[in-house]
Amino acid sequence: MTFANRELFPFSTDVNDRDHLTLGGCDVIDLVSEFGSPLYVFDEDTLRGMCRQFVGEFSRRYANTRVAYASKAFLIPYIARLVHEEGLALDIVSGGELAVAKVVGFTPEKIYFHGNNKTPDEIALALEYGIGHFVIDSFYELDLLQEMAGEKGLKQDVMLRVSPSIDPHTHVYTTTGILDSKFGFSIETGDAAKAIRRAMDASNLNLDGIHFHLGSPIFELEPYSAAIHAVLNYLTQFKEEGLNLQEFSPGGGFAIGYVRDEPPPEISEYAEVITSTSISVTKELGFGEPRLIVEPGRSIVGRAGVALYTVGGIKDIPTVRKYVSLDGGMGDNIRPALYDSKYEAVVAGRMSAPAKDVVTLAGKYCESGDILIRDVELPVIKTGDIIAVPSSGAYAPSMASNYNLNPRPAIVMVKDGEARLARRRETYEDLMRCDVL
Ligand SMILES: Cc1ncc(COP(=O)(O)O)c(C=O)c1O
């Protein structure tokens, strides 16, 4: 069945004869009764389907592609296991993400460790696990890793993250490839050249690849081709000095639909521009056929996840605004407050009711900025209604906090009419588990 915003919801979404939203064959009103509210529901078919789309679209254009799931978008053991089963590699940025990878036995060789300030402890854990690549982001890390790999008698494979000074036109907080960024070695300042030479000279490091990441979400295709051109052309000067480019990564940042009037490019369009530019430029410059690593995060989990909230109080300020308060908010989804991100919503128990009201969906946290959606058209809402917010799977539960000491929501996976708890709701005891009483 179709309904407004259908394309923002998981693949398996439908409406049943009770006029309720269903995900993976499960009635979401029943899910809230069983697992509580707020609740995050992930559709397994969408998760697997997105992994397959990425692998399929890239590999059929460029066989030597590796798709690495950028786990910062959302990682729990269930998802780590699923992406591993789908054959993806893993991009991690912390010891915590590494710990989850280890718990599911993720193939160490397929792990790429990113981040602008990996601690000595994190580096030690990753060396111990034997991960495939560190993606070095600073001179400090380069020297530290050389020393720590040396102590272990290793020659560690590494890539360097460079910053090509290309603006992908996304939010300033999520723009990473420009000159004024904390990430990567700048090409413009000469740091990238210094770092490449220092890494090639480091006896315990094997520099076999170069990485960049422009930002996220990137709705345009052109920044990818411009940056691939710029970075590969820049790298030609190091070929004679012995740079062996076996891996090349233009990062992630592929957009998803959050609101109905801003559709993202298709995965096939990203794949086409990235592979065709990489193929033609590597060929022209004589770089052979390096492994292409793409790092989708948001686009694997974003559409798969739906947030469910229960309506509490409603405050109508005539001629000004009607606030509809939900039982979640910035503690489970900080994106609207942090990036001014936009979302859509539906009333999950009355899917065919016409939109007759304009309301502002407010969170329950003690901040005036805790507004989930401003001025959204919805059916007339009453206390107790369940509101479903699509495209909530990425950078929402992964950035969740315990602000105001609210427990973080449960995570449920759905498939073929079955719902499985992947993470239980936190209890008040959980909130105090690290406290010394
Ligand atoms: C190095 C790197 N790769 C990939 C990603 C994933 O971006 P997205 O989730 O938008 O695909 C990020 C996001 O910050 C990143 O920093």
Image (spheres, rainbow, N blue to C red):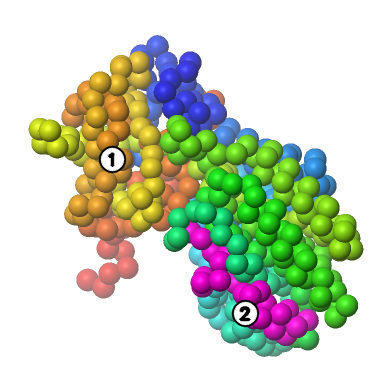
Total number of numbered discs in the rendering: 2
Q: Is mark 1 within 8 Å of ligand 1?
A: no
Which of the labelled discs sits on residue 110, or is there none? none
Instruction: Say what amino acid the circle numbered 1 marks.
Output: Arg
Foreground of the two, 114 or 412 = 114
Q: Where 112 sits versus 195, above or below?
A: above
- Residue 177 location in percent, x, y? 58, 64
Dot 2 crowding, Cα within 10 Å, few <14, some 14–19, many 20+:
few
Residue 128 shows up from this direction: no
Where disc 1 sits, the SS reads: strand
Q: Quadrant of residue 327?
A: top left
Foreground of the two, 81 or 268 = 268
Residue at the (22%, 47%) spot, across then down: 364
- Residue 148 location in percent, x, y? 66, 84
Q: Quadrant of residue 126?
A: bottom right
Q: Where 392 sits versus 243, above or below?
A: above
Q: Nearer the viewer, mark 1 or mark 2?
A: 2
Where disc 2 sits, the SS reads: loop
In this rendering, would 304 be left or right of 429?
right
In this rendering, would 72 be left or right of 314?
right
Dot 1 crowding, Cα within 10 Å, few <14, some 14–19, many 20+:
some
Foreground of the two, 123 or 293 = 293
Q: Where 85 sits versus 117, above or below?
A: above
Q: Quadrant of residue 226?
A: bottom right
**Residue furthest toward the left?**
318
Q: Which residue is mark 2?
A: 189
Q: Is mark 2 within 8 Å of ligand 1?
A: no
Span of residues in magenta: 174-200
Q: Which residue is mark 1?
A: 374
Residue at the (72%, 65%) spot, across then down: 231
Give yes or no for residue 66 being in the magenta stretch: no
Residue at the (56%, 71%) spot, across then down: 179
